[in-house]
């Protein structure tokens, strides 16, 4: 795959939120190659520091912002190695390797369940004194999100259907359900102190009440969106799936969506190649790559860092595609399949899952859906045995006749 750079927020705020969009612009302007950017309201000036974790050194910065968040900037190599390998919004089970079939998993994942939650969480935040940084655990509170009307409740199947936009609204075509809901219903507050394992009620200024819930995704998306995301994320998923199944007539719309989540950024070969390869594939593989690609032969990592070409080659700024959020990555992957590689996207003839590949492809591969693949192979074997049995019976009948 083409090397990319992911900007992954811990709190999955709608990208159409004006204050968050402005904060992202500030973060891009202030960023100098750090692995993590803290958005800290009340901060007076940008702060930068380094943290040591084992043999790795991570660079971080904090910028003055309108909203709180923390963004992990992960460089992804052409071999899908990631650096940093583990952080917020990066599942540990990946071991620093971006899955090849992540788009397929997202398209074929179940819709999220709804669950209750508390109104705060604990997290170590950076503080500053005399140009030094120290971390302290802080109890961070958050306010309720926007409200969405319930269209139907299916008690037998334990399903809830939401309707947006409301019938009495003036919305022509929904673009951002979260932003639109705030315009129609305003902001909500907690009616009572919420609890993590109960039904919590919120209320707006006009007295309209709603039940507060979060989205509960299947693995690995529950780790990619640790706080559930919101209705804009769910809308993005539904829209992505529709465009994938009708890709030919929606090529331009897919490209338009990608443009909202991507921009021209920069990185270094140190972050894009050296660190991902070292962390995910080891020193021997790294030396093999640099010898073959850059004609650099060394005996140790220390010698490599001190090589006369290192700064010139591996710390020089190079262009890279910057992608915002996991939803942006999914649109980028879909655009690559449809508009760059011309791949076919359809439903599996056996299980109905969305599959990609050649135009004549009919069924899931082993990586796309192992259960469907095994079932098809088992069916093929049964059919083969039936054919063999019919042939044997035909031979016996012919022998008896002779």
Image: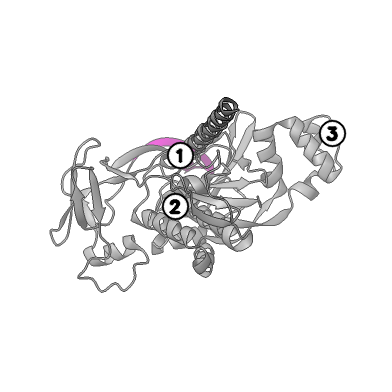
Dot placed on the residue nearer the N-terminal end, 3 or 1: 1
Q: Which residue is mark 3?
A: 298
Task: Say whether residue 356 is magenta.
Answer: no
Task: Mark 1: give few (<14), some (14-19) or many (20+) Cα within 10 Å.
Answer: some
The percent position of residue 48, horizontal first and vertical second, equals: 56, 47
Q: Residue at x 50, y 38 (%)?
A: 376
How many numbered markers are drawn?
3
Residue under pointer 2:
43
What residue is drawn where x is 21% and y is 41%?
194
User: Which of these two is toward me, 55 or 256?
Assistant: 256
What's drawn in magenta, residue-wise?
126-139
Residue 220 is tagged as 1
Labels 3, 2: front one: 3
Q: CA distance from mark 3 to mark 2?
A: 44 Å
**Residue depicted at x 36% and y 45%:** 228
Question: Residue 366 occupies which quadrant of the picture?
Answer: top right
Which sits in the foreground, 373 or 99? 373
Q: Secondary structure at mark 1?
A: loop
The percent position of residue 392, horizontal first and vertical second, equals: 57, 28
For the C terminus, the image quarter is top right
Question: In terms of sequence position, does the residue under pointer 3 or pointer 2 come before the other?
Answer: 2
244 relative to 59 in the view: left or right: left
Camera-side mark, 1 or 2: 1
Residue 37 seen anywhere in this rendered image of the structure: no
Label 2 crowding class (10 Å Cα cut-off): few <14, some 14-19, many 20+? Answer: some
**Measuring 37% from the left and 66% from the top, which residue is drawn there?**
175
């Amino acid at each position: 795959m083409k090397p990319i750079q992911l900007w992954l927020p811990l709190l999955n705020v709608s990208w159409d939120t004006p204050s968050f969009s402005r904060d992202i612009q500030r973060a891009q302007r202030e960023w100098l190659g750090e692995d993590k950017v803290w958005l800290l309201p009340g901060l007076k000036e940008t702060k930068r520091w380094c943290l040591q974790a084992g043999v790795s050194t991570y660079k971080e910065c904090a910028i003055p912002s309108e909203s709180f968040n923390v963004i992990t900037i992960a460089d992804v190599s052409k071999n899908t190695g990631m650096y940093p390998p583990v952080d917020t919004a990066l599942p540990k089970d990946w071991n620093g390797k971006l899955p090849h079939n992540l788009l397929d998993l997202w398209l074929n994942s179940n819709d999220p369940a709804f669950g209750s939650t508390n109104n705060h969480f604990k997290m170590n935040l950076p503080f500053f004194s005399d140009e030094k940084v120290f971390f302290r655990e802080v109890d961070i509170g958050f306010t309720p999100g926007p409200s969405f009307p319930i269209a139907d409740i299916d008690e037998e199947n334990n399903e809830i259907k939401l309707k947006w936009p409301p019938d009495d609204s003036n919305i022509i075509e929904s673009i951002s359900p979260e932003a639109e809901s705030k315009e129609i219903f305003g902001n909500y507050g907690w009616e009572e102190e919420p609890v993590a394992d109960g039904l919590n009620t919120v209320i707006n200024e006009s007295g309209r009440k709603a039940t507060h819930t979060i989205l509960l995704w299947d693995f690995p998306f529950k780790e990619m969106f640790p706080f559930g995301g919101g209705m804009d994320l769910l809308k993005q998923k539904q829209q992505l799936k529709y465009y994938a199944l009708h890709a030919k007539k929606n090529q331009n719309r897919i490209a338009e969506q990608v443009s909202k989540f991507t921009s021209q950024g920069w990185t270094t070969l140190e972050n894009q190649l050296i660190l991902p390869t070292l962390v995910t594939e080891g020193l021997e593989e790294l030396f093999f790559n640099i010898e073959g690609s850059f004609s650099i032969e060394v005996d140790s990592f220390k010698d490599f860092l001190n090589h006369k070409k290192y700064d010139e080659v591996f710390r020089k700024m190079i262009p890279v595609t910057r992608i915002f959020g996991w939803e942006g990555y999914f649109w980028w992957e879909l655009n690559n399949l449809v508009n760059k590689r011309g791949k076919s996207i359809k439903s599996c003839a056996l299980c109905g899952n969305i599959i990609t590949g050649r135009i004549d492809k009919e069924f899931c591969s082993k990586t796309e859906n192992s259960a469907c693949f095994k079932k098809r192979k088992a069916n093929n074997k049964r059919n083969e045995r039936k054919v063999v049995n019919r042939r044997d019976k035909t031979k016996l009948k012919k022998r008896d006749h002779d």
